[in-house]
Image: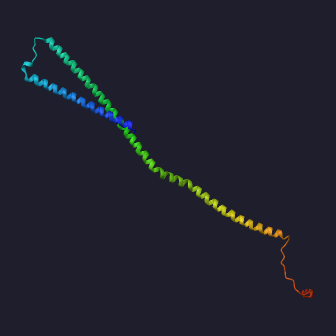
Amino acid sequence: MSQFDTSNIQALSTEVSQLRQELQLRDQLVQQLSQELFRLVKGNANFMPQRSEPELDLTQLQALREQLQAVEQQVAFYQEQITARDAEIYQLRQSVQELTDRSRMLEQVVQELPQIYRRKFEERMGPVREKVVTLQRENRQLQAELQSVSYRLALKNRNASHSGIDLPNFPRPASGPSSISTPQNA
């Protein structure tokens, strides 16, 4: 909830309280005036109006009725304002409650985000790890094959450089040809 909304709610609440106080004050004044009028009329027998001027009584009665009607209109107006402000306050409170609930929900989501990201990362890393293991196995196989091919190639190059078959070199005897024995035919 923004600071503007909070200050607006406080201002409206203050204004509603002031209107209620004014209305209570007016109600008290009307009550006091009616009590005072009743006390004056009841306590003073001379207060009774004279019957000689009925038109004056009717005019005063009409003026009092108009004043009463004006006060009733003011009371109704203030009552409507109070009702409207109460409805507005109710709506603002509901809005505050909804925003508070949403804020709590968002705070909870924010707190859960690191765990969610870790879990998602682990889920994505599983296939990558398997692929790395497979590639390492293939790499070892290829290195073994490369060593085997290198060894065979080295052997082939060695054989090709001797132009033919490698024959063993035997030591030559110091004496002449008589020392070589020939097989005799029987």
Residue 144: where, in percent of width, then height? Answer: 69, 65
Q: Is residue 176 left or right of residue 65?
A: right
Q: Is residue 135 left or right of residue 14?
A: right
Toward which corner of the image does residue 101 lie, by quadrant? top left
Residue 168: where, in percent of width, then height? Answer: 83, 78
Residue 145: where, in percent of width, then height? Answer: 71, 64
Toward which corner of the image does residue 98 lie, by quadrant? top left
Residue 70 against residue 169 in the figure, above or below: above
Residue at point 9% right, 23% down?
Answer: 42
Viewer-side residue, 177 vs 89 = 177
Residue 61 against residue 82 in the figure, above or below: above
Residue 71: where, in percent of width, then height? Answer: 23, 23
Toward which corner of the image does residue 75 lie, by quadrant? top left
Circle count: 0
Residue at point 33% right, 32% down?
Answer: 87
Residue 108 against residue 78 in the figure, above or below: below
* Image quadrant in which the C terminus is located: bottom right
Residue at point 83% right, 69% down?
Answer: 161
Residue at point 28% right, 27% down?
Answer: 78
